[in-house]
């Protein structure tokens, strides 16, 4: 065998080996690309699922916040209406005739007398003459008329020694009734 034949044989072996290496490299490249595509698809799918979960969570939170805001507005409107009803009720009580206020003062003073046997009676300026008539009646001689105070009606009785005071103003009674009957009033107005 001549030198040319040996060189040709070596070249052929090198070409065959190079071809095998190139084929092996192509196979490895295909395997790596396939793995990379699989990983990329998995990452993409996971990211899309996370985005959908996050979007769903945000939607749920926004819906809940919206419902809460609406509920808050409804409750505020209901409270405003309840406050208006309470104010109108007090106005109507205050606009009742003097005979009602005189009778109310007598009844409230009798009630106060069981706790404070003598003292000073404060009143709404509008009720000055009604209080004087009630105090002139027998049974209330231990009480004196004090100064008018800023109340809508009713009385505030203070003991002679100043240690005890009872608030029997209309607003106090209305607040007590209102608090005890708030649920019933709410049911009537809003259901």
Image (tube, rainbow, N blue to C red):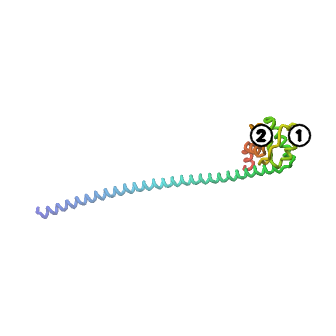
The x and y percentages for residue 44 are 44, 56
Instruction: Identify which residue is drawn at 76% across, 51% down.
Output: 87
Q: Which residue is mark 2?
A: 158
Instruction: Identify which residue is drawn at 73% across, 50% down.
Output: 83
The x and y percentages for residue 38 are 39, 55
Q: Which residue is mark 1?
A: 137
Task: Give 59 or 72, whichever is nearer the viewer.
Answer: 72
Q: Is residue 124 left or right of residue 5?
A: right
Crowd rating for badge 1 (residues with CA inside 10 Å; few <14, some 14–19, many 20+): few
The answer to whether one can see residue 66 in this image is yes
Instruction: Identify which residue is drawn at 22% across, 61% down.
Output: 15
Task: Give 85 or 171, whichever is nearer the viewer.
Answer: 171
The x and y percentages for residue 122 are 79, 44
The residue positioned farthest toward the bottom in the image shown: 4
Q: Earlier in the sequence, mark 1 or mark 2?
A: 1
Secondary structure of residue under mark 1? loop
Secondary structure of residue under mark 2? strand
- The Cα–Cα distance between marks 1 and 2, rounded to whole angstroms, is 19 Å
Task: Give 143 or 154, whichever is nearer the viewer.
Answer: 143
Q: Is residue 190 left or right of residue 125?
A: left
The x and y percentages for residue 71 are 65, 51
Looking at the rendered image, the quarter that the N terminus falls into is bottom left
Q: Quadrant of residue 139?
A: top right
Image: 166 above or below 11: above
The answer to the question of whether label 1 and label 2 lie on touching residues, with beta carbons closer than 8 A, is no
């Amino acid at each position: 065998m001549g030198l040319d034949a040996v060189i040709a044989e070596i070249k052929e072996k090198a070409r065959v080996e190079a071809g095998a290496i190139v084929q092996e490299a192509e196979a490895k490249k295909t395997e790596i690309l396939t793995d990379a595509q699989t990983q990329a698809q998995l990452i993409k799918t996971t990211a899309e699922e996370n985005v959908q979960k996050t979007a769903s969570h945000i939607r749920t939170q926004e819906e809940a916040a919206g419902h809460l805001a609406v509920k808050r507005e409804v409750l505020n409107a209901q409270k405003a209406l309840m406050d208006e009803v309470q104010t109108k009720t007090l106005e109507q009580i205050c606009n009742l005739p003097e005979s009602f206020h005189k009778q109310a003062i007598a009844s409230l003073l009798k009630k106060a007398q069981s706790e404070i046997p003598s003292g000073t009676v404060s009143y709404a300026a509008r009720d000055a003459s009604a209080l004087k008539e009630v105090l002139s009646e027998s049974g209330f001689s231990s009480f004196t008329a004090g100064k008018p105070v800023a109340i809508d009606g009713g009385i505030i009785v203070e003991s002679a020694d100043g240690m005890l005071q009872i608030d029997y103003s209309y607003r106090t009674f209305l607040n007590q009734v209102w608090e005890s009957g708030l649920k019933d009033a709410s049911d009537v107005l809003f259901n």
